[in-house]
Amino acid sequence: MNRPPLTAEQREQALQQLAEHVAAWQQMATALMPALQAAAEQLAHAFAELQRTLQAAGLLDADGRPVRPVDRPAWQSPYGPPTRR
């Protein structure tokens, strides 16, 4: 499809519409940022509380790594004993 080139007036109108859309997006982003920041901070606090809870329960060590379960020897497979054939 070959379209005729835009006239100067059409080009100016398109640029003006683009500028209006960009301004609207910037205004929306500016209004949205405080809400997103507050949500991100709440999420970070929730994860920190979860880590403290897991450490207090003895499931994580001081570095945040999982603690090995003590219910089986280290040599035993986590998938149970081997099956007999």
Image (cartoon, helix red, strand yellow):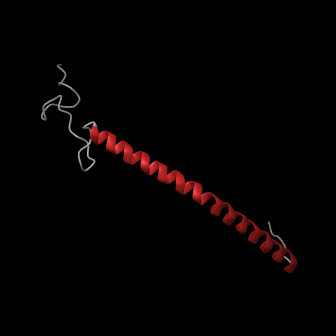
**Camera-side residue: 11 or 46?**
46
The quadrant in which residue 8 appears is bottom right
Q: In this figure, what is the number of numbered marks?
A: 0
**Camera-side residue: 32 or 53?**
53
Q: Position of residue 9 (x, y in %)?
A: 87, 78
Q: Position of residue 78 (x, y in %)?
A: 22, 31
Q: Residue furthest top?
A: 85
- In the figure, is residue 36 to the left or right of 84? right
Q: Is residue 63 above or below residue 30?
A: above
| Residue 5 visible in the shown view | no
Q: Residue at x 53, y 51 (%)?
A: 39
Q: Residue at x 34, y 44 (%)?
A: 51
**Camera-side residue: 21 or 83?**
21
Q: Is residue 23 above or below residue 61?
A: below
**Camera-side residue: 54 or 66?**
54
The quadrant in which residue 10 appears is bottom right
Q: Quadrant of the N terminus?
A: bottom right
| Residue 10 visible in the shown view | yes
Q: Residue furthest bottom?
A: 8
- In the figure, is residue 54 to the left or right of 5? left
Q: Position of residue 31 (x, y in %)?
A: 65, 60
The quadrant in which residue 85 appears is top left
Q: Position of residue 25 (x, y in %)?
A: 69, 63
Q: Residue at x 58, y 58 (%)?
A: 34
- In the figure, is residue 53 to the left or right of 32? left
Q: Is residue 45 above or below residue 23?
A: above
- In the figure, is residue 64 to the left or right of 46? left
